[in-house]
């Protein structure tokens, strides 16, 4: 929690932003227990609404990969000690796997 708060302080987080929304990128296949831990930390530092998205989906959006058609796209997100491999399409992640490698 201290690391997240330290980062938010570094980027200019103030108490005026109390109740703001945040989106967290998480590896594929995270359990609800793991997501609850993120949610509790976010609420403890004053973030009101917390949203979660799988990292490969965010990577695809950041690279402007067209997800509006029905054909699947294979996305590999490497970095930070976790590698996520996913097949994406219209409805989001079709299948995905995250491993501790990278």
Image (tube, rainbow, N blue to C red):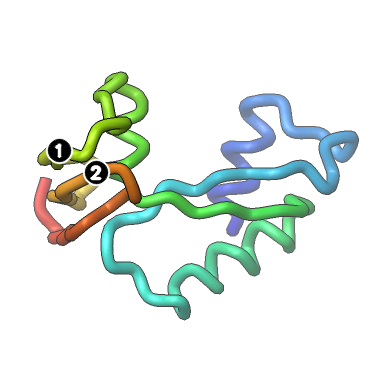
> Reading the chain from its start, which is encountered first: label 1 or label 2?
1
* Label 1 close to label 2 by CB (< 8 Å): yes
Numbered label attached to residue 100: none
| Disc 2 target residue | 89
Marks 1 and 2, how far apart in space? 6 Å
- Residue 77 occupies quadrant: top left
Q: What element carries label 1?
A: loop
7 horizontally vs 62: left or right: right
20 horizontally vs 28: left or right: right
- What is the number of callouts on the image? 2
Q: Residue at position x 10%, y 53% from top?
A: 101
Judge whether residue 83 can be spotted in this image. Answer: no
| Disc 1 target residue | 71
Give the vertical position of 57 relative to 10 (above or below).
below
Give the vertical position of 44 relative to 23 (above or below).
below
Q: Residue at position x 78%, y 53% from top?
A: 46
Comparing 67 with 40, the one in front is: 67
Within 10 Å of disc 1 (Cα), the crowding (few <14, some 14-19, many 20+) is few
Position of the N terminus, as image quadrant, is bottom right
Residue 42, percent from left and from top: 65, 57
Comparing 29 with 99, the one in front is: 29
């Amino acid at each position: 929690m201290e690391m997240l708060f330290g980062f938010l302080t570094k980027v200019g987080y103030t108490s005026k932003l109390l109740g703001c929304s945040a989106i967290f990128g998480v590896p594929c296949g995270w359990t609800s227990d793991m997501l609850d831990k993120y949610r509790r930390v976010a609420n403890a530092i004053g973030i009101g609404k917390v949203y979660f998205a799988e990292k490969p989906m965010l990577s695809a959006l950041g690279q402007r990969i067209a997800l509006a058609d029905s054909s699947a796209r294979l996305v590999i997100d490497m970095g930070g000690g976790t590698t996520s491999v996913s097949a994406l399409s219209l409805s989001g992640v079709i299948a995905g796997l995250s491993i501790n490698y990278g």
